[in-house]
């Protein structure tokens, strides 16, 4: 309130609630949304990590905004932030001052929204960010081990935005400037909302009139998915296919009668406070979630605008003396070159949230940011990362846009590199050299993961550039597994390609007289992966003399193919059954194989062919 009064404001237009500590930096979603709305001339306040356990003063002290409340969990899904793959509570939080845990609730978006709707039932609440985005339709919740309806139902929010908020959030503000009008809000791209049968029938009638250009898809309802997991898989195929198209359709999913949905959930023990959910909906009518198609990807000028807003690039002064915010410390000297990823990995949510098509910044925008970083008082000359969701997709796109417009592939890399893809690294290497030439930059590292299946027809030029000029001694890549059966379900290339990369990497190092390390990432417990597959992974990586440091157990997160396979035991694209290590014991057994190398090194046992790894552990 002191800051509000200091600005001479007697009213706020928008109040944003976030599960993260507030860092005014373009890598933090709430900061970007706040600056975008500020640039519209709006008076914006951000309430970071409000206390939801006390008398709710953090939700009350700024009062009611003129336009709307915005709610997000922050940069991470709150459940992934809170729990390990074995559902154990984490002891730290990278997005909190001092790295302390306990400053955000489980299901933060739902918790914050329910509180706001109870306190201010007539004020619109807009939910967004990664947590809302990936729960916009029926989804599998790993932590409750059940299918959940759209988070719109669960939270009682008025409108949901998915994906990146650069275009949609300012448009929502403009629409609400003349008062709350749900009919106008429903016309905005990249939003989801709850509608009645009359509204849906009108959409279907309008679509029927289009004849040859139909653009509405009716999904199986939430109740149908509950009763038949195959239908949940069919829904996912439609959702993923549309999210990867350049011109996707409207998606409609029935949720039945909201009151009945909550009665079913409450009886199953999955929802304990359904009484808080109202959202202004009539619980006795059939309802539907409608998801509008997204805006087109941001062009270069729009990307530059978003990254060029007047960020301080610093945590808020309120955190002075409370300890560093680990996530900020990791990225404060890094530069994000682009958004989006066309890799299409089965377990990854990037394309579902940011999109498959790459949006890149101009060289000038990037170099301006580098110059700004150089001027920071604690900068020592080292850019920690020139990257993005995948480090080496900058300015990559299809040569023929008309072919891209017709394409429905979830990945431009799997099962092989698309022939229409311009995978040239020349622009990226030119940019690396220009950044390195900025006065004050001693070295610019590549910290983001590199897609080595993009090196085709490259002649090794990009790998040499990175190894010789942008690595601090360790290059991280993500083969994820060694066995083709598992890799196919992951939509990852054959491990033979990693062996080739390993040979090229070692050759470059030998010729340059340097001793660098290639650090591979691996995943255990992915659908389709058995203990035998993990044993083969351990044997293969031991033969290649790799210490397995960057490893993780698979965590099913909403809106991924891998999570659908985990829940259903079926590949929804082929209908084939898939083995799933579902219990925590099975998952722990699989992850234990990652540490086989250490047992070899300590003389724990000599041959994995003659005895099981687990018996070696016991001995």
Image (tube, rainbow, N blue to C red):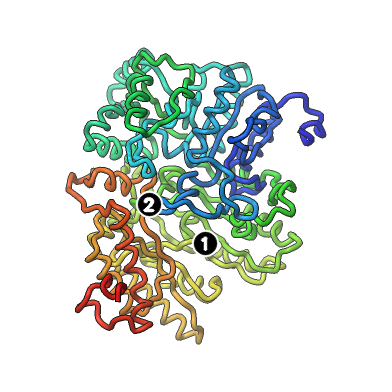
* Residue 252 percent coordinates (x, y): 34, 26
Q: Secondary structure at mark 2?
A: loop
Rendering quarter of residue 139:
top left
* Residue 311 percent coordinates (x, y): 69, 46
Q: Is residue 562 above or below residue 267?
A: below
Q: Nearer the viewer, residue 432 or 276?
A: 276
Picture disc at residue 555: 2
Residue matched to label 1 = 428
- The reply to whether residue 254 is in sight is yes
Q: Residue furthest left?
A: 576
Q: Nearer the viewer, residue 582 or 504?
A: 582
Mark 2 or mark 1, which is nearer to you?
A: 2
* Residue for point 63% across, 21% down: 177
Q: Nearer the viewer, residue 3 or 404?
A: 3
Please tell me how crowded label 2 is: few (under 14), some (14-19), or many (20+) other residues with Cα within 10 Å: many
- The reply to whether residue 215 is in sight is no
- Answer with left or right where residue 107 lies relative to residue 231: right
* Residue for point 25% across, 81% down: 607
Q: Is residue 92 above or below residue 473?
A: above
* Residue for point 59% across, 35% down: 52
Quadrant in which the C terminus is drawn: bottom left
Distance (Cα) linking label 2 and label 1: 32 Å
- Answer with left or right where residue 14 lies relative to residue 114: right
Q: Is residue 337 above or below residue 163?
A: below
Please tell me how crowded label 1 is: few (under 14), some (14-19), or many (20+) other residues with Cα within 10 Å: many
Rendering quarter of residue 423:
bottom left
Rendering quarter of residue 210:
top left
Q: Earlier in the sequence, mark 2 or mark 1?
A: 1
* Residue 46 percent coordinates (x, y): 66, 37
Picture disc at residue 253: none
Q: Secondary structure at mark 1?
A: helix
* Residue for point 45% across, 28% down: 273
């Amino acid at each position: 309130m002191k800051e509000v009064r200091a600005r001479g404001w007697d009213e706020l237009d928008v109040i944003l609630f976030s599960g993260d500590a507030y860092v005014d930096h373009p890598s933090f979603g709430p900061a970007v949304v706040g600056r975008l709305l500020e640039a519209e001339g709006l008076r914006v306040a951000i309430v970071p990590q409000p206390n939801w356990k006390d008398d709710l003063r953090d939700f009350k002290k700024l009062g009611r905004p003129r336009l709307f409340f915005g709610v997000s969990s922050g940069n991470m899904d709150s459940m992934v932030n809170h729990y390990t793959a074995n559902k154990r509570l984490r002891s730290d939080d990278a997005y909190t001052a001092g790295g302390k845990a306990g400053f955000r609730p489980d299901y933060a978006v739902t918790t914050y929204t329910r509180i706001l709707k109870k306190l201010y039932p007539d004020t619109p609440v807009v939910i967004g960010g990664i947590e809302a985005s990936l729960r916009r339709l029926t989804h599998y919740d790993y932590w409750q081990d059940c299918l959940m309806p759209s988070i719109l139902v669960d939270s009682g929010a008025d409108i949901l935005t998915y994906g990146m908020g650069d275009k949609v959030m300012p448009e929502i503000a403009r629409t609400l400037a003349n008062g709350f009008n749900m009919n106008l809000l429903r016309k905005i791209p990249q939003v989801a909302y709850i509608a009645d049968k009359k509204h849906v029938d009108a959409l279907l009638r309008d679509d029927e009139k289009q004849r040859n250009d139909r653009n509405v898809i009716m999904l199986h309802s939430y109740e149908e998915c509950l009763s038949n997991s195959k239908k949940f898989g069919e829904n996912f195929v439609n959702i993923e296919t549309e999210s990867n198209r350049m011109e996707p359709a409207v998606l409609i999913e029935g949720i039945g009668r909201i009151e009945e949905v909550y009665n079913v959930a409450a009886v199953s023990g999955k929802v304990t406070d359904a009484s808080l959910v109202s959202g202004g909906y009539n619980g006795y009518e059939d309802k539907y979630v409608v998801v509008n198609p997204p805006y087109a990807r941001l062009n270069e000028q729009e990307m530059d605008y978003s990254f060029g807003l007047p960020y301080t690039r610093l945590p808020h002064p309120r955190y002075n003396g409370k300890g560093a915010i680990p996530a900020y410390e990791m990225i404060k000297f890094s530069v994000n070159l682009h958004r989006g990823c066309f890799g299409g990995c089965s377990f990854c949510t990037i394309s579902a949230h940011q999109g498959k098509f790459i949006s890149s910044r101009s060289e000038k925008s990037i170099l301006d940011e580098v110059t700004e970083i150089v001027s920071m008082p604690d900068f020592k000359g080292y850019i920690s990362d020139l990257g993005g969701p995948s480090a080496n997709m900058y300015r990559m796109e299809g040569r023929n846009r008309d072919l891209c417009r017709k394409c429905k592939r979830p990945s431009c890399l799997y099962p092989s590199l698309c022939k229409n893809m311009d995978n040239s690294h020349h622009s990226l290497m030119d940019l690396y050299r220009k950044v390195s030439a900025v006065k004050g930059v001693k070295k610019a590292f590549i910290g983001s993961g590199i897609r080595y299946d993009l090196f085709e027809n490259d002649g090794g030029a990009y790998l040499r550039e990175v190894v010789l000029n942008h690595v601090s001694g360790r290059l991280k890549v993500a083969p994820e597994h060694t066995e083709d059966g598992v890799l196919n379900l992951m939509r990852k290339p054959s491990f033979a390609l990693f062996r080739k990369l390993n040979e090229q990497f070692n050759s470059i190092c030998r010729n340059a007289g340097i001793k660098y390390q290639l650090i591979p990432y691996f995943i255990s417990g992915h659908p389709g992966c058995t203990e035998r597959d993990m044993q083969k992974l351990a044997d293969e990586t031991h033969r290649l003399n790799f210490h397995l440091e960057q490893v993780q157990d698979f965590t099913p997160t909403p809106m991924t193919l891998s999570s659908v396979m985990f829940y259903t035991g079926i590949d929804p694209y082929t209908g084939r059954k898939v083995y799933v290590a579902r219990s925590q014991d099975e998952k722990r057994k699989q992850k234990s194989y990652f540490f086989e190398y250490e047992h070899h090194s300590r003389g724990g046992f000599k041959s994995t062919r003659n005895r099981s790894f687990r018996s070696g552990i016991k001995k």
